[in-house]
Image (cartoon, rainbow, N blue to C red):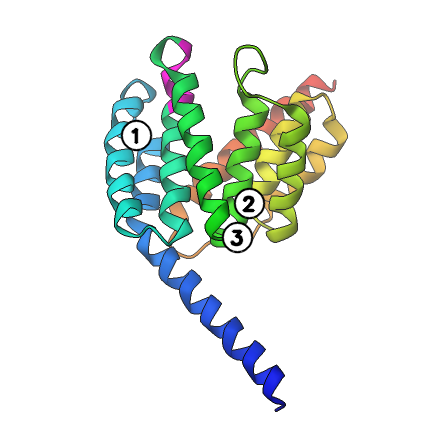
């Protein structure tokens, strides 16, 4: 094997090892997040997310050169924002989640199959626009496209982009992405998250099907 090809192969292998280590590092955060989202009453979720965000912050603080802990800290903080509501400080939490996700992109945009782009896109899609917040539909679409380029068959980028399209009344496009999300491959160790997400996907497919009648 030529020296250049060998070097590329070694670097690719090293990147894979680093990504695998990052995946394992955040597994406890992922598992607790799924337990909160899919098994706890919504009225209790905000405080549970707050506790989990503190754990995620300790992890990201202890691993400053890894993108994965920052991504999951951002996901947990944005999840808390989603259940807090405007009067509960949701906008401030959304801004903090955005900052964390942007910091993770500076380290590794490919970490967790581009999950930072998916989460940032969702924030831009759901947060109010100027002058209230930083929401921006054009940027949301841009980030969704980047997340899908990195993880075209993934359940999350296809679901969230499908949800975004449905909210924009682009129903035919939305249905295609949602159906693709429903058929996404299982993620080892993420059984609860996959099961819960598929229920959300099916519920949205049912809703847009009824709305189209």
Question: Residue furthest toward the top?
Answer: 87
Q: Secondary structure at mark 2?
A: helix
Q: Is residue 169 above or below residue 160?
A: above
**What residue sits 45% from the left and 45% below the top?**
104
Q: Is residue 74 above or below residue 164?
A: below
Question: How many angstroms separate mark 3 from mark 2 (CA)?
Answer: 11 Å
Q: Is residue 107 above or below residue 83?
A: below
**What residue sits 40% from the left and 19% below the top?**
92
Left or right: 102 with respect to 181?
left
Question: How many angstroms separate mark 1 from mark 3 (CA)?
Answer: 23 Å
Residue situated in front as seen by the camera: 206 or 28: 28
| Magenta residues (range) | 81-86
Image quadrant containing the N terminus: bottom right
**What residue sits 33% from the left and 50% below the top?**
64
Q: What residue is shown with label 1?
A: 49
Viewer-nearest of discs 3 and 2:
3
Point out residue 52 in the picture as x, y percentages from the top left corner. 26, 35
Question: How many angstroms separate mark 1 from mark 2 (CA)?
Answer: 22 Å
Q: Earlier in the sequence, mark 1 or mark 2?
A: 1
Q: What residue is shown with label 3?
A: 113
Point out residue 143 in the picture as x, y percentages from the top left corner. 62, 38
């Amino acid at each position: 094997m030529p020296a250049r090809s060998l070097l590329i192969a070694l670097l690719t292998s090293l990147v894979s090892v680093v990504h695998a280590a990052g995946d394992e590092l955040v597994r406890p955060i992922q598992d607790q997040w799924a337990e909160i989202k899919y098994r706890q009453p919504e009225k209790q979720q905000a405080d549970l997310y707050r506790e989990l965000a503190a754990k995620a912050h300790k992890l990201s603080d202890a691993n400053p050169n890894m993108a994965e802990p920052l991504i999951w800290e951002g996901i947990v903080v944005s999840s808390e924002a989603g259940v807090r509501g405007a009067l509960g400080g949701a906008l401030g939490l959304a801004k903090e989640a955005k900052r964390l996700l942007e910091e993770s992109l500076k380290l590794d945009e490919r970490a967790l199959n581009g999950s930072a782009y998916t989460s940032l896109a969702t924030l831009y899609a759901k947060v109010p626009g100027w002058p209230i917040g930083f929401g921006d539909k054009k940027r949301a679409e841009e980030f969704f496209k980047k997340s899908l380029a990195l993880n075209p068959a993934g359940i999350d980028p296809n679901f969230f982009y499908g949800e975004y399209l449905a909210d924009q009344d682009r129903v035919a496009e939305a249905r295609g992405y949602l159906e693709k999300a429903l058929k996404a491959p299982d993620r080892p160790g993420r059984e609860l998250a996959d099961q819960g997400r598929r229920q959300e996907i099916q519920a949205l497919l049912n809703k847009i099907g009824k709305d189209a009648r």
